[in-house]
Amino acid sequence: MDNLIDGKLIAATLQTETEREVQELLAQGILPSVAFVRVGEDPASKVYVGMKEKTAAKLGIQSRLYILPEDTSERALLDLINDLNNDPSLHGILVQAPLPSHIRQAKIFETVSPSKDVDGFHPINVGKLMLGDNDGFVPCTPGGIHELIKRYKIETRGAHVVILGRGNIVGKPMASILVQKAPYADATVTVCHSHTRNIGELCRSADILIAALGVPEFVKADMVKPNAIVFDVGVNRIADPSSPKGSRLVGDVDFKAVQPIAGKITPNPGGVGPMTIAILMKNTVRAARMAAGSVSKQDKTH
């Protein structure tokens, strides 16, 4: 079926645009630069940071990797972030989550300078997003979904959007984006979570369904309205004896069952995931342009 939302294709287009911006900055003597901070040896975090480093290098963005031991104190991490905040040659800072349990994640995110917060997690940027102020940075995954909505010209005005998941990384910021009085927003948004009653009924009422619960294949065929637009954000590993690794990755949507019903749907992998890194790179270049004082009103819109 030709109803796939091709995140790989759109991410590649976005990266080409970002690479062009990098070349423009380099011509002005500005090298966009981002720091990746990883605490501990979480396997998934190592993979994610590696992918971000690789993409940055491909686009001509300088990246610096700081790897700290698992037992690093919160104070030591905060000191590193403050050093990075005060480095004028550095434009973006990303602290890879999750962090060890003895470190307060919220404290770390609020210590990163808002002007270098390319992840969009600082309270100031969160507040700007809620208020519809486009001067801030948008979290990368919701920003990526919104970019797909725009590039595929999906009508959101007056649409009922149901978001499964109320997390700070996807659910809440996604709701903030789509509820604004703005192009490719103006939607009626319902946020569901583990205590939501009649969740299946709410899902069936959605014109656009965004699944970010972190529950493998939670969304079944009978939960999706015919021709609804479905975005699958979840990344879950499940046992699969037939797989060479004994397991495989699946999303929050039962893709095989839902695809024939959906008007459009993101594959998983290959849908939302590539967009997250593409938006991170876009945010980094925008941070560099802001530092140079060359951001126009048009650049501030998301």
Image (cartoon, helix red, strand yellow):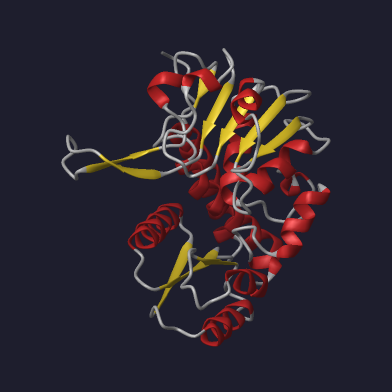
* Rendered residue at 48%/64% (across/down): 98
Pick the quarter of the image with the C terminus: top right
Q: Is residue 288 above or below residue 226?
A: below
Q: Is residue 86 above or below residue 129?
A: below
* Rendered residue at 62%/42% (across/down): 193
Locate residue 24, reporting x and y percent: 58, 53
* Rendered residue at 43%/56% (across/down): 52
Q: Is residue 44 above or below residue 149?
A: below
- Give the side of residue 267 with respect to residue 123, left or right: left
* Rendered residue at 75%/51% (across/down): 129
Locate residue 188, reporting x and y percent: 77, 30
Q: Quadrant of residue 127?
A: bottom right
**Residue 172 appears in view:** yes
- Give the side of residue 134 with respect to residue 228, left or right: right
Foreground of the two, 187 or 224: 224
Q: Is residue 262 above or below residue 26?
A: above
Total numbered labels placed on residues in the image: 0
Locate residue 49, reporting x and y percent: 41, 61
Foreground of the two, 15 or 84: 84
- Give the side of residue 116 with respect to residue 26, left or right: right
- Give the side of residue 156 with respect to residue 21, left or right: right
Pick the quarter of the image with the N terminus: top left
Locate residue 205, reporting x and y percent: 67, 21
Foreground of the two, 165 or 147: 165
**Residue 292 appears in view:** no
